[in-house]
Amino acid sequence: MLSRHILMCSRVGFTPSTSQAVFHTSAVNSVLPRAKPLDEEMPLASPKKPRPDTQILDLSGKRHKKDIDIIVGDQYLQQWYKMETKNLAADYLALCKSKLSLFVASTATCGVLMAPVPVAADSLIAATVGTFLLSSAANACNQLLEAPYDAQMRRTQTRVLVVHRFSPLHAFTFAGVTGLTGIGLLAYYANPLAAALGALNWFIYAGVYTPMKRSHIGCTWAGAVVGAIPPLMGYAAATGYLDPAAWCLATILFSWQFPHFNGLSWNLRGDYSKAGYRVMCVTNERLCRVTSLRHSVALLGLCSIAAPLTDLTTLTFAIDSLPVNAYLVYLSYKFYKAPDAKNSRKLFFYSLLHLPLVMLLMGISNYGRNEQQKEHISDRISNGYNKMVDSVKSFSL
């Protein structure tokens, strides 16, 4: 009887029990072998076709044993040449930062007018237009390199390359055409020295200053050098050489950059830090304030002492520029003592007025010179001393 029950359990797949019950009701899992599907049951595989929005780039050269092609979608290739501009003329002006480029060109014009030679129309036009074109090229390169970081800052997130009004290829072409045209104008209508200074300034702005902003605090000094070269370009376009007066003019522009840029950047510290820029207002706030005050005082000395000594201007300019520079020193000192948004904004906006006033006073003093004032200051001092000695001798007699 027991053997009969064991035989039945083995047939139906139950496990014999060791208890008083005859068998347990738990079933043993029976595993069936996996069968390979028949060919008729397999779905028909359609041949792979390249997507309509792709292109196959053939990396030719020497073919290895295995041919390798890279498939790049059209949407990625179109990013280099596709443009979504609404007003082409306005977008070109935004790409070249037309207001800033006009301001830079005006400093080159000042260099031409302050040169100790008669003003020639060809050199004046070449210096002004050539500097504007080179500044436009430098600004286009700057926006091209900084587009990913401009998108992170509120002040720059609407620039034309960020919002895809221009393609990178178009911006690069624009920078090349304007830059080379500006160099050609300066070389043909002025002289090679002015053209070389323009090419150097383009390289410093696009190749040194722009990458340096994300790596070193010295980027502000590199940017100040860029701002100091345009008046040298104008002076060289008019004379063909650089003398102490030209370097004094460039130094004035160099020192002006610090209160101007530091006043601008102070209220944008958060954006600059977010984008990864290593400017003074982010890395060393005290140095930012001290540098602004230091160069404001330097401007006072340059305009009132160095400019007459180098025969850039007359003593009249030294006196006339005193209140203009003294107020800049006052605003820089307030910014140093209380670096808040109000004082930094005042310093920045006054710097925009300060430089045109200084250049205007320079031009007035230069074109108001009489024959005696056109002499070098050392000759004027010696001649004045001799006249004083002669007058004393005649009085004693």
Image (cartoon, rainbow, N blue to C red):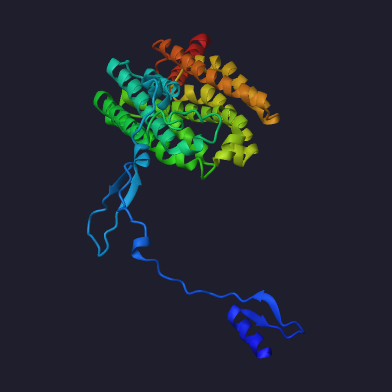
Compare residues 179 and 291 and report the one nearer the observer.
179
**Residue at left offset 31%, top offset 42%:** 52
Say above or below: 388 vs 49: above
Compare residues 376 and 159 and report the one nearer the observer.
159
**Given the current orientation, which residue lies at the most extreme front position?**
1
Left or right of 122? Residue 210 is: right
**Residue at left offset 34%, top offset 46%:** 72
Question: Is residue 115 in view?
Answer: no
Q: Could you say which quadrant of the image residue 132 lies in?
A: top left
**Residue at left offset 59%, top offset 32%:** 268
Where residue 218 sits: x, y (%)? 52, 41
Say above or below: 135 vs 63: above
Question: Is residue 24 in view?
Answer: yes
Where residue 253 sits: x, y (%)? 48, 27
Left or right of 397? Residue 28 is: right
Q: Could you say which quadrant of the image residue 106 lies in?
A: top left
| The N terminus, quarter of image | bottom right
**Given the current orientation, which residue lies at the most extreme right position?**
20
> Disc count in the image?
0
Compare residues 84 and 361 and report the one nearer the observer.
84
**Given the current orientation, which residue lies at the most extreme left position?**
62
Say above or below: 158 vs 219: above
Where residue 35 sits: x, y (%)? 43, 71
Compare residues 243 and 204 and report the one nearer the observer.
204
Say above or below: 232 vs 386: below
Where residue 168 sits: x, y (%)? 37, 35
